Amino acid sequence: MEKATSLSGLVRTKSDQLVETLAAAFKSPPSSVAAGSGGSGEVSESVGASRRSSRRMTGASPGRSGGKNTHIRKSRSAQMKFEVEEMINSGAALSRASSASLGLSFSFTGFNMPPDDIIADSKPFSDDDIPEDIEAGTGKLKFQTEPTLPIYLKFSDVTYKVVMKGMTSTQEKDILNGITGCVNPGEVLALMGPSGSGKTTLLNLLGGRLNQSNNRGGSVTYNDQPYSKSLKSRIGFVTQDDVLFPHLTVRETLTYAALLRLPRSLSREEKTKRAIDVIQELGLERCQDTIIGGSFVRGVSGGERKRVSIGNEIIINPSLLFLDEPTSGLDSTTALRIVQMLQEIAEAGKTVVTTIHQPSSRLFHKFDKLVLLGKGSLLYFGKASEVMAYFSSIGCNPLLAMNPAEFLLDLANGNINDVSVPSELEDKVHVGSGEADTRNGKPTPAIVHEYLVEAYETRVAKREKKKLLAPIPLDEEVKLKVSSPKRLWGATWWEQYNILFCRGIKERRHDYFSWLRITQVVSTAAILGLLWWQSDTSSPKGLQDQAGLLFFIAVFWGFFPVFTAIFTFPQERAVLSKERSADMYRLSAYFMARTTSDLPLDLILPVLFLLVVYFMAGLKMGAAPFFLTMITVFLCIVAAQGLGLAIGASLMDLKKATTLASVTVMTFMLAGGFFVNRIPVFISWIRYMSFNYHTYKLLLKVQYEHRMPVVGGTRIDSGLEEVCALVAMVFGYRILAYISLRMMKLQSGA
Ligand SMILES: Nc1ncnc2c1ncn2[C@@H]1O[C@H](COP(=O)(O)OP(=O)(O)OP(=O)(O)O)[C@@H](O)[C@H]1O
């Protein structure tokens, strides 16, 4: 215990020194902020100095002193361990604050590659790391710590409601009721609360992802400025579900993210190197060539996938990092590792906000600040280390030794079974007359909730709101950097198109070489070839038979592309929404890349098909008719794909989309000119919308032009009308799909 006291004294002495350092840094003239951009050497040195000072600090704290600490940990009781950890945290938070504040004297020009010694020095973590290392604080990660614009996040009286439309009535539901708090660079803020208490909603709101002004109230500011689109490039947002492409490898995933998101000032090589650095820093080397995987394909483990999701966001070196339950579903060691990583990120001067469901006590002590929510109301905001003292001050103490997080969640749920009841609450039980007010002589969860909200309102809320009014220690010019309305794209339109095109090809490479699809097409072609083997057109019956084959070709290549294209956008909806929320690329670049990257395969398969059918069925010999048939089929495929894309993009629901597509395709087929020739005038227009009809007419023209003017009731014309109609469909349906995507709501997460 004595040792602990002396160590705490040491940390406090260091903290005093730091306060002085901080004050000096804040007082540094604004010119030093701007001047930082002048010499990168100078910047690197400052970065190194900041890190060195931070390391010295943590080295001085007991928890980071390697073997010595391990000795303390092993020989003392669990209680002792808590105290030591608390001291470590206070030391770490201070060191983080120092890094953050020192970052102010650097340039804010964006990226500077970290000095080589730091990269070489970095010790990645892997699943094989010994947890003891982390406990002792010696397995510390050295994150990329290029200085970024420090962002002070403040939120005051934040409210959010949703309007729920029922069959007969419309109801409003309050999700958040007046939440106030703040988090500074160098700090990790944890949002805690029972399931459904509003953590994700608050996180989305703070991350600028719930912007419908009619549903929200209060204010959220970033360096005292409101949210602006330029912040998107400074914010990393890790969603609860890992939204990643299942068939890309870890390295490919991070490389594409780097190429799309890092600023244009970096070269392609530098961006690629950044992805490799992140892989090393996240300890993903072992699985860097493994695919991410998903529900149907096995890939990396859950913890690795979570790390890739985090890597996807930290790759841009964000000033503000939001994470939604980054540890849920992970074992306690992996969870600790991830929270440790968040601490490292904060140490580099970033602001970190994370929701957390039920952290272990080890995790809990790693947070600097805490927001405790209960049914959308604020039950506590302040230092995580002071939360137990606060609840003790309002008469709530655990009766058993328990994890503080467990105690807090019990309270937030209104469960006070193992909690000492404050006298005010006891009074309420005695005053309350009905069964509804009490449960076995104990206050109901609703009464407990009311008491906790009231206690916070009367004792803390005012003080915290006052604190928010204090100006942030940043230069006016620096503050305004967050409010530029200009979007910052990481790559030009053409670069985005190329990157997305290559990514699309890689993601669907398994489809391209799918023997199943090839076998399906080739075997259908072979069966058709056998059924129409060397078909003879000298008799009317033979001619009618061959026309049937041509009609089948028009239907087959109208049907398949629609049903494959339907899946394109609904399947990628989550990724598209996430990436667009982060302004990774322009929608037009994505749309063009997505619709063209499938074309090579879509054009290879019909070639194989025609090579088999055309010659087996004995269609008109000659290079010109063969190639004209092929071009006609291509046009049909691209037009049909357009229809599939439009249906998928406008409905974004596979069930609805397949139903609509099957009705449409069937109608087009029936109106295609083979089954019925005399269509009533009032519905004859439907024919002109059918790509089957135009394709069939063009195929007839290629085969029988100059031989007969009418085949099976269908007139052979010049073909110009049909070609124009198909070309109009190729573009028209795609424009419709693009407009639908533009109108798609971006991910809100809540
Ligand atoms: N768009 C919405 N429509 C209806 N209810 C909503 C909507 N968004 C959020 N809610 C409700 O608001 C409450 C808070 O949801 P939120 O997802 O923020 O909770 P949470 O604390 O993150 O929960 P969990 O820990 O289970 O993820 C829930 O009761 C949820 O059902």
Image: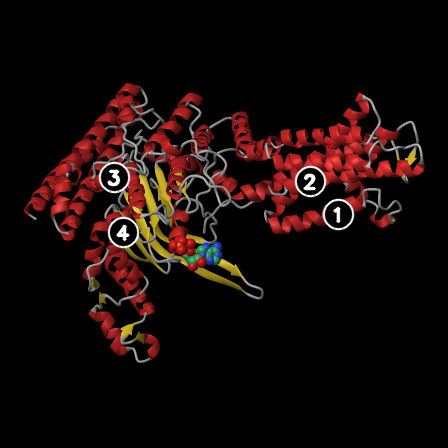
Q: What is the C-alpha distance between the residues marked 2 and 4?
A: 52 Å
Q: Position of residue 321 (x, y in %)?
A: 36, 40
Q: What is the C-alpha distance between the residues marked 4 and 3?
A: 18 Å
In primary-sequence order, the first of circles 1 and 3 is 3
Q: Residue 360 got which mark?
A: 4
Q: Secondary structure at mark 1?
A: helix
Q: Are marks 4 and 1 in contact (CB under 8 Å)?
A: no
Q: Is mark 2 within 8 Å of ligand 1?
A: no
Residue bearing the label numbered 3:
130
In primary-sequence order, the first of circles 3 and 2 is 3
Give left or right: position of 582 versus 140.
right
Q: Amino acid at mark 4?
A: Ser
Q: Is mark 1 within 8 Å of ligand 1?
A: no
- Say which residue appears at 80% left-offset and 22% top-offset: 624
Residue 142, quarter of the rendered image: top left
Residue bearing the label numbered 1:
666
In primary-sequence order, the first of circles 4 and 1 is 4
Give left or right: position of 215 versus 540.
left
In primary-sequence order, the first of circles 1 and 2 is 2
Q: Nearer the viewer, residue 213 or 94?
A: 94
User: Which one is closest to the eye, mark 3 or mark 2?
Assistant: 3
Q: Position of residue 364 (x, y in %)?
A: 26, 50
Residue bearing the label numbered 2:
560
- Circle 3 packing at 10 Å, graded few (<14), some (14-19), many (20+), is few
Q: Is mark 4 within 8 Å of ligand 1?
A: no
Q: Secondary structure at mark 2?
A: helix
Q: Secondary structure at mark 4?
A: loop
